[in-house]
Amino acid sequence: MNLWFRLFWYVVFHSWRRKIEIPEGVSKLNFRVWPLDLDASFHLNNGRYLTLMDQGRLDLMVGGGVVQAALRHGWTPIANAIVIRFRRELRLFEKMQIQSCVLGWKGNEIVIEQVFLSKSGPRAGHVAARAIFTGGLYDRKAKAFVPVSRMMEEIGTSIVSPELPAEAEAFFESIERLRDLDRSSARS
């Protein structure tokens, strides 16, 4: 299914849905694997996972009130890094659900976990893929990232991050190593 159609479908049928309490709430979006989602192995293309994850994060942001705050201040969401582990394939016409939740944050970066669950067939209920995402809101006027604590204040929620799980801390460490590598190669 065309990605623009999925976005249109979301705006028309889902964007008005329930409020999601951040950081406790979970966004749950249901999809089906369509022919345009397939790769040469006839299962969900690995790039398509990342694109569908965008819609899960959008739902989290809309339901949590972040989009309204971002529009009010001219902030734009920016992805920083994603790590994903594929466990089981999702095949043509298979139903799936993407669950997205905030794990916590550090400074200007929020950490979101996204899980793909198979919702049909013999693997219903099994995890097809799990991802950890970091990103933030960028203030184009100030030319700086918005501290997550400021975003939390804007949506009227707690400004204290839950303790990050070990896998999120390890992810932050790997991101920092990549940043160091980028800095050293830029000097060369």
Image: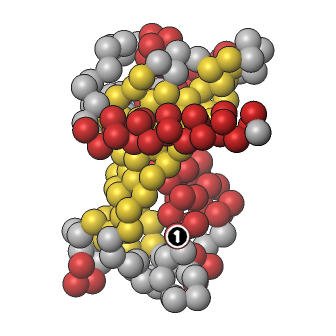
Looking at the picture, tell me which residue is in the foreground, 93 or 143. 143
Visible residue check, residue 129: yes
In the rendered view, would you say 4 is above or below 13?
below
Indicate left or right for 162 with 7 as reference.
Answer: left
- Residue linked to disc 1: 46
Visible residue check, residue 9: no
Looking at the picture, tell me which residue is in the foreground, 72 or 109. 109
Q: What colour scheme has been applied to the protein in the rendered image?
A: secondary structure
Tell me which corner region of the image, top left, top right, bottom left or bottom right, holds residue 164. top left
Dot 1 crowding, Cα within 10 Å, few <14, some 14–19, many 20+: some
Identify the residue at image location x=47%, y=18%.
107
**Circle 1: element type:** helix
Image quadrant holding the C terminus, namely top right
Looking at the picture, tell me which residue is in the foreground, 64 or 149. 149
Image quadrant holding the N terminus, namely bottom right
Q: Position of residue 103 (x, y in %)?
A: 32, 35
User: Amino acid type of disc 1?
Assistant: Asn
- Residue placed farthest to the front in the image? 188
Tell me which corner region of the image, top left, top right, bottom left or bottom right, holds residue 47. bottom right
